[in-house]
Image (cartoon, rainbow, N blue to C red):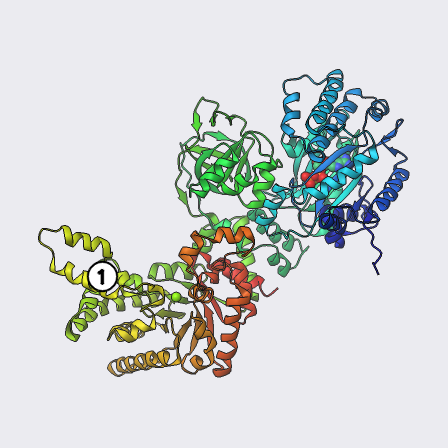
Amino acid sequence: MDKPTTYVHTFAEGDRTMAALLGGKGAGLAEMTRLGLPVPPGFTVTTEACTAYLATGQEPDGLGVEVARALAGLERATGRTLGDAEDPLLVSVRSGARFSMPGMMDTVLDIGLNDVSVTALAKASGRERFAWDSYRRLVQMFGHTVMGVDGGLFEAAMTGRELDAAELVALVEEFKDIIRKETGEEFPQDPGEQLVRAIRAVFDSWNGERARVYRHREHIADDLGTAVNVQAMVYGNLGPDSGTGVAFTRDPATGERGLYGDYLPDAQGEDVVAGVRDAVPLAELKTHVPRAHTELAGHLETLEDHYRDLCDVEFTVERGRLWILQTRIGKRTAEAAFRIAHDLREERTISADEALARVDGTELTRLMFPRFATRPGAAPLAHGLPASPGAAVGVAVFDSAEAVRRAAAGERTVLVRRETVPDDLPGMIAAEAVLTSRGGKTSHAAVVARGMGKVCVCGAESVTVDPDARLLTTADGTVVREGDTLSVDGTAGTVHLGALPLTASDVTRALETGTATGPLTEAVLGALAHADSVRRLEVRANADTPEDAARARALGAQGIGLCRTEHMFLGERRSLVEAMILARDDTARERALAALLPLQRADFTGILKAMDGLPVTIRLLDPPLHEFLPDRTALAVRLATAKHPDVRDRELLDAVERLHEQNPMLGLRGVRLGLAVPGLMAMQVRAVAEAVARRLRDGGRPRAEIMVPLVGTAEELRLACAETARVLAEVSAETGLPMDLPIGTMIELPRAALIAGQLAETADFFSFGTNDLTQTAWGLSRDDAEASFFPLYLEKGVLTASPFETIDEEGVGRLVELAVTFGRLANARLETGVCGEHGGDPASIRFFHRAGLTYVSCSPFRVPVARLEAGRATL
Ligand code: ADP
Ligand code: MG
Ligand code: MG
């Protein structure tokens, strides 16, 4: 039996908890109606109706009847009839998905106008021009959105014309002709048909190109569908006491307290978003229609109190009367996110936990990116509005396709447009920054850029953009052509020619040295302090030098989870390593190793000093030896072309050939190397132990741990541990100091995860090397796969994210869980951590928290991000 379905809800029936069914916009309209805010009446067609329609290509049974019934109700409530010949009701048909997708889907205004009702509207409003302009908008929007006519044809017919009433009458006829010519169909005069077709068009727009691109980028599921809102029209273009605007309860760019927004007198809603005309600051509404401003301020306060977060609204003033057309939790920049969360917590509107939940690691990363170093004297090329903060350098491009093309070739670009339209979305994604010459802070470019965290300067009016000639001209006549480098400062709202030098951001400086202060850094430090107080996961850093260790510590690292020793073998020391590899007998090898020992000891001493009192996990040499030798081809060529071939080169080439492997990443490396090259492991362990001894003698508290890489069998680990223990005992006997260093293993082969119980009998700790574990579990090489077929796999949906960026929970994650469980069964005191790239990835950190690991380790720069996310993982 089919369950009875209700596909339509009036605004008075719904509320904000119904966003999945009514879409964000519909739920917001319903909630505002319940709160008693002045919302033009209307009804919502549910997302279920949309998904049913998209599945079958037909409106589901009963939908037509329900819409007709709801329309009749709306007509009763307004006392008007849709498209009536005397006093017509007009409606808007508005898309509205579960998650806000600004401007990505379609909306049609002024449904109900036709050749007859347009005259009635003129009479009822007393404004002929207004009525014909509304009709013109309807025919244009309907023709484009519903009937699929190229929007450019309408634009072209309109350009350069003085649109008075008579001209608009003519234009409507021309538009109808265009429709007839392009589609072979008439513009429908029947208001009911207009409504039904507009609803269908909104359903269809869910699968439109730009909506799909946006969803993939924002990780919104493709099967949710959109709701459709049908709402009585109100008019902002009825003279000086009318207008339309967008308002925020706080500044969405900086988070600063206080009303913020744009207002456009005598205009309709879509004019603001399109940036067609330049809006004035919201405060000016006070002088235009004072009462509406006061009312608006009151309603915004009601909304913020109710939603307990930044809200934004679309509003329209019709002849002095205020109407609210939309509300939602406002999108905001990273800076605003931290400040608003902090302020709301201080205002006691939300708890500390809630404040922490409202910011995330991605936003924090954005705030830690460098900014432009201030260079007094360097005059900017142009000033605009600081629409979305940050610093970006790239070459100027003048259309979306060029931005995409160049980005694919690895080039950084700045997308320069007069104003952006939804079709520019791919280019905005590809570019580092967006620059427009027109539009306010709530224009399309600004809203979309903020949502994506992309640098944006908009409304740089002194700049003339010529997309056809692919250049821009500034007020003083400077010409910037495609390919010229620009620096865009989205924080200051300026654009500079050439690449400006970058410097650490205030937030980074505040975190590292505590030297920067201000409301933003205070908010960030507040969020981190709370995260630290609730998190269970410890955060360590991957660091190979004393400098990195010190930096990581300043950023809050609680130790080093991975200290790689291979870089210590490079540079000037390469010849010593070569000598070790080329050694023909034990004496020669021992001599080479003995030369390396003091150097390694000094390295370790410095790092242990920087991390005094905190654990430092040192990994024994991991990469295959050939990485330390010259390139095989280059060497062969050198030998072949030399007049007097060098003996050493000859020996080197022999060694390179001897060590050559088809698949070095699966070859003689990690613990295998330690077992195969006599004395290598002993030298490294001795260097660590002697560094510990030195620090102890200097009164330090060294906490070195020794980690064995690429273990696959219990016997490998036993042999490595026995050798390590032997050397530690030796050094202990020599120095008279205790040398009970923890010895652990990396888990980076599936086999190691599967025999974790056996390994834990020997190991004091496990460290998951999730980079290699992902490569070996998937059987694919990161370097090759990411460059070759990953883009295809992501596009086809085989993968939703790169498993090298975000841990593959069901595969690699399962191995981690398994190893933790069996490891702990065998050894209750086993410590577990992660030292792969995933240790700094927000989604992965949540997983590691759930898996019960002791710590994550990541690059120093990501330590604050990991601290924040480890805190958020507990909420
Ligand atoms: P989007 O989701 O792209 O913002 P909307 O459905 O909000 O699309 O509508 C586009 C514009 O039309 C907005 O500025 C909105 O305020 C305006 N608008 C929508 N419905 C009405 C209405 N009933 N009366 C007046 N203006 C409206
Ligand atoms: Mg809107
Ligand atoms: Mg590894």
Q: In the rendered view, would you say 564 is above or below 406?
A: below
Q: In the rendered view, would you say 210 is above or below 380?
A: below
Residue 487, image x and y in percent? Answer: 44, 36
Quadrant position of residue 503: top left
Horizontally, is 234 left or right of 819 in the view?
Answer: right
Which of the image's four quarters has the N terminus? bottom right
Q: In the rendered view, would you say 574 is above or below 327?
A: below
Q: Evaluate whether residue 725 shows in this view.
A: yes
Horizontally, is 359 left or right of 741 in the view?
Answer: right
Residue 840, image x and y in percent? Answer: 48, 60
Name of the residue lying farthest toward the left: 644
Horizontally, is 230 left or right of 364 in the view?
Answer: right
Within 10 angstroms of label 1, few (less than 14), some, or many (20 or more) residues? some
User: Element under label 1?
Assistant: helix
**Residue at image point 37% right, 68% down:** 612
Residue 502, image x and y in percent? Answer: 41, 43
Q: In the rendered view, would you say 664 is above or below 242?
A: below
Image quarter for ligand 3: bottom left
From the viewer's side, name the closer residue of 562 and 231: 231
Q: Amino acid at mark 1?
A: Arg
Does the closest atom of ligand 3 sit within 8 Å of the Cβ of label 1?
no
Residue 420, image x and y in percent? Answer: 58, 34
For disc 1, the marked residue is: 573
**Residue at image point 90% right, 35% down:** 79
Quadrant position of residue 598: bottom left
